[in-house]
């Protein structure tokens, strides 16, 4: 036993040498102690001892014979010997001198020795048992030490706060959370009498102002909670309505777990008073009061940055509680969310079922009881057991009601005129269809830049109070969506922190600075929204910001515009890459400026191909054909005056095709998503463009019929055109529009002469409508079978164009 204690002491000393605390039951400490003991030779009280790598104890023993005052070895063990036969007792020597000087072994009385036969030489079993027993003794010492330490630590009750330590002081020192003044019996009694007055149920007529409970005593100004002082710090006190509390193992473990919760958005539990008649929980005190108090204070201006920050803080705190020992809050409401001096929301009064077990319940028929149920999920109403325990999905529903309070700055169901809390709860228990939920309109006015943020918050709020609990989003999902929204709107964490700092200065009347920073943030958000709106349709961008899937949508009738540059490959061949980029950039900027004035959406540009649509993503009835036709005429007019930087004499030969038909639109991809169009209408329009003539608007018969119905457009029949996959199609050229001031552009005379093309073949005089063009009517479109025979195309046009381009480019390079 002494040798075992010596080994244990050396192990503990090794832990201390490593700057560790032997009272901590950690794996590292245990490993240090065991490593110190194993494979060790040392001098014990019984001689040399050996502990092998398996923890077995071996001792070298000797049997000595006292003869004439001297000892003679007659038997021994040597466990260090490498040979097994040398490790155990040797045979007794025959010349042993027994007491009395006799050489003869004394007879053993029958009452003592049952078998006088000498013991066998091999006593391995005896010694193995002895060694194992010694080793188990060491293990028991270890176990006893750690068990005592663990039990002592487990039952440590430093969270228990005597009522005598909770006292009221006369005044603040001016520093938040700090109190000056000594405690005395008078103030102590006054405090507890006040606190336990507040334990009594609130009068029913004041149930709608339950969050306004304020303790206005001791010269402490407006205190939004029941407060007291603990060790010179202001703390909040939550009385528990029960007369006695039994300190069970489960309750002690629960309090230990609750006090170890550490999160920015979770209020710290300091301890509890467990004295009969004075049972209460002691929490950290937040100077701004509860969230309900902040929302009801009209002197506090809350923009959408604050509202988004509040909801994000609550979601983060609840996500932490759901992932830890608390599991479920069960009583989440705006009065159980407190706001600290940095305008950070913290969850308080979270679930402690063992501590609250046996607590007196409210009168189930009181208005105060019905008011507190306004945050409760409908599926929990009527089930007392579930209502007491709470659920995670129920917490999410309660969070949605808090979001309604934040958005509207009104009480729960504040816009339901004529409904009192009891009526609301009864309607919720009936589970109406559609579900009965708080009204959100009329909403307070909001700046245009914040409209998107508000709508995003409203959409997530609706998901959180969904009728079906399984469809409600989790707090982790909500936090992810909030992060995406902030990233999409350009709201970074640094800017939010800066806003919080500015708000603290706002309390000192620095409103101008707050407004300046808010304006900067709104400008950045607006820029980001504009950039995103240029890349994707606004409705699609909104869904992507919300993290929602963009479902492909079918459009029955839209009009598409396709254009390309005839001879672009030849131009690119004699131009540098930078010159090609500059050419396309200049041309498309010109086109983009024109499109901004039309109800049209630029779909994409691929090299020299330019695609525009009207009628999607926002439907515009039957006007899409007229919009695209007018846009095409306008673009042709602008092309006439367009100058290529590095070839000023070159005329851009734009070919345009327009067609009306159905398409399917959707977003493809997640990284750099693209808004794409699919369907035969896309292919058909591309065929019209590739089979068109330079500086002509090639129109399909379907689009022609739409324009004829709308009226006001002048078209010329082209004839039958062979198109891949379509056969021969009777197509038309759009040559004018009533009231359109700009004439259709013509090829430059010098270019046409070089190519050798007749001007009238490519650009008929629009004014000579009697001989070369006519107004197309709906009746004329119905008789396609009587159309004129196909016009033969000039087979040498491509070659002539190449020669013309080469001549003009060469001329430009010389000059």
Image (cartoon, rainbow, N blue to C red):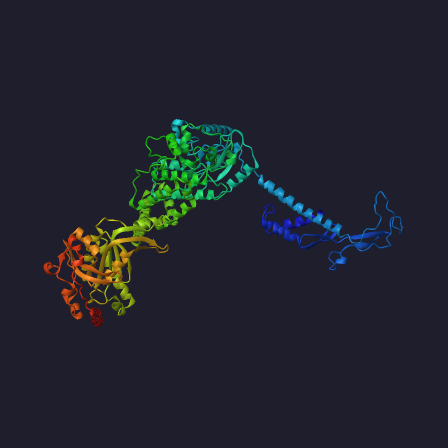
Q: Which one is nearer the viewer's eye here, 265 or 480?
A: 480
Q: Is residue 75 above or below residue 747?
A: above
- Which residue occupies 40% across, 43% down? 471
Q: Which one is nearer the viewer's eye here, 674 or 766?
A: 766
- The answer to whether any part of residue 675 appears in the image is yes
Residue 285 spot, x, y in % from top left: 45, 37
Q: Is residue 39 above or below residue 417?
A: below
Q: Is residue 208 above or below residue 501?
A: above
- The answer to whether any part of residue 180 appears in the image is no
For this view, does 628 lie left or right of residue 382? Answer: left
Residue 749 spot, x, y in % from top left: 15, 67
Q: Which one is nearer the viewer's eye here, 369 or 21?
A: 369
Residue 663 spot, x, y in % from top left: 28, 53
For this view, does 465 lie left or right of residue 598? Answer: right
- Location of residue 113 by image quarter: top right
- Which residue occupies 29% across, 44% down? 447
Q: How many marks?
A: 0
Quadrant into which the C terminus falls: bottom left
Q: Is residue 589 above or below residue 269?
A: below
Residue 2 spot, x, y in % from top left: 71, 47
């Amino acid at each position: 036993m002494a040798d075992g204690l010596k080994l244990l002491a050396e192990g503990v000393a090794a832990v201390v040498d490593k700057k560790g605390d032997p009272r901590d039951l950690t794996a590292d400490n245990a490993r240090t102690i065991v490593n110190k003991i194993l494979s060790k030779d040392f001098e014990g009280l019984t001689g040399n001892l050996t502990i092998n790598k398996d923890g077995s104890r071996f001792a070298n023993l000797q049997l000595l014979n006292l003869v004439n005052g001297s000892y003679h070895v007659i038997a021994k063990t040597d466990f260090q010997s490498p040979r097994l036969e040398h490790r155990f007792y040797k045979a007794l020597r025959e010349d042993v001198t027994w007491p009395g000087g006799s050489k003869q072994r004394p007879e053993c009385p029958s009452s003592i020795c049952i078998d006088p036969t000498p013991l066998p030489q091999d006593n391995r079993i005896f010694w193995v048992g002895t060694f194992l027993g010694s080793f188990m003794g060491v293990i028991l010492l270890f176990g006893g030490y750690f068990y005592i330490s663990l039990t002592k630590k487990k039952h440590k009750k430093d969270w228990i706060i005597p009522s005598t330590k909770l006292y009221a002081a006369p005044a603040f020192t001016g520093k938040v959370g700090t109190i000056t003044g000594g405690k005395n019996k008078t103030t102590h009694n006054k405090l507890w009498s006040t606190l336990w007055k507040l334990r009594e149920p609130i009068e029913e007529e004041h149930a709608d102002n339950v969050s306004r409970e304020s303790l206005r005593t001791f010269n402490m100004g407006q205190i939004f909670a029941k407060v007291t002082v603990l060790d010179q710090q202001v703390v909040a006190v939550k009385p528990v309505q029960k007369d006695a509390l039994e300190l069970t193992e489960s309750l002690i473990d629960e309090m230990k777990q609750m006090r170890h919760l550490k999160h920015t958005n979770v209020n710290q539990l300091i301890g509890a008073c467990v004295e009969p008649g004075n049972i209460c929980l002691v929490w950290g005190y937040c100077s701004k009061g509860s969230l309900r108090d902040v929302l009801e204070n009209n002197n506090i201006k809350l923009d959408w940055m604050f509202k988004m920050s509040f909801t994000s803080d609550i979601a983060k705190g609840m996500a932490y509680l759901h992932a830890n020992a608390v599991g479920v809050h069960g009583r989440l409401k705006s009065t159980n969310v407190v706001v600290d001096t940095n305008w950070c929301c913290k969850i308080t009064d979270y679930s402690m079922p063992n501590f609250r077990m046996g607590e007196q319940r409210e009168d189930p028929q009181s208005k105060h009881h019905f008011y507190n149920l306004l945050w409760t999920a409908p599926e929990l109403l009527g089930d007392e057991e579930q209502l007491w325990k709470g659920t995670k999905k129920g917490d999410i529903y309660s969070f949605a009601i808090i979001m309604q309070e934040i958005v509207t700055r009104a009480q729960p169901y504040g816009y339901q005129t004529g409904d009192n809390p009891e009526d609301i709860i009864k309607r919720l228990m009936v589970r109406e269809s559609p579900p009965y939920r708080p009204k959100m309109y009329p909403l307070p006015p909001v700046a245009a830049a914040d409209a998107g943020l508000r709508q995003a918050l409203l959409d997530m709020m609706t998901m959180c109070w969904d009728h079906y609990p399984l469809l409600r989003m989790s707090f982790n999902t909500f936090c992810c969506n909030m992060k995406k929204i902030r990233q999409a709107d350009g709201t970074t964490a640094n800017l939010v922190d800066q806003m919080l700092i500015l708000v603290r200065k706002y309390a000192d009347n620095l409103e101008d600075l707050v407004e300046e920073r808010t304006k900067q943030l709104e400008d950045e958000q607006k820029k980001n929204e504009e950039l995103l709106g240029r890349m994707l349709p606004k409705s699609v961008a909104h869904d992507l910001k919300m993290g929602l899937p963009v479902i492909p949508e079918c459009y029955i009738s839209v009009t598409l515009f396709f254009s390309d540059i005839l001879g672009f490959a030849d131009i690119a061949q004699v131009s540098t890459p930078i010159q090609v980029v500059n050419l396309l950039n200049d041309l498309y900027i010109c086109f983009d400026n024109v499109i901004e004035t039309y109800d049209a959406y630029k779909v994409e540009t691929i090299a020299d191909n330019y695609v525009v649509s009207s009628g999607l993503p926002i439907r515009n009835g039957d006007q899409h054909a007229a919009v695209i036709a007018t846009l095409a005429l306008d673009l042709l007019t602008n092309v006439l005056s367009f100058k290529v930087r590095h070839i000023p004499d070159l005329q851009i030969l734009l070919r345009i095709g327009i067609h009306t038909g159905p398409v399917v639109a959707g977003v493809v991809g997640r990284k750099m998503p693209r808004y794409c169009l699919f369907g035969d209408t896309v292919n058909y329009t591309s065929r019209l463009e590739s089979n068109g003539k330079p500086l002509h608007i090639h129109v399909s018969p379907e689009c022609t019929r739409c324009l004829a119905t709308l009226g006001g457009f002048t078209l010329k029949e082209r004839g039958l055109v062979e198109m891949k996959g379509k056969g021969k199609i009777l197509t038309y050229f759009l040559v004018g529009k009533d009231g359109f001031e700009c004439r259709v552009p013509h090829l430059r005379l010098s270019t046409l002469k070089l190519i050798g093309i007749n001007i009238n073949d490519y650009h008929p005089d629009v004014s000579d409508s009697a001989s070369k063009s006519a107004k197309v009517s709906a009746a004329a479109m119905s008789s396609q079978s009587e159309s004129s025979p196909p016009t033969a195309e000039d087979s040498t046009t491509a070659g002539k164009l190449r020669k013309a381009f080469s001549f003009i480019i060469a001329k430009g390079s010389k000059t």
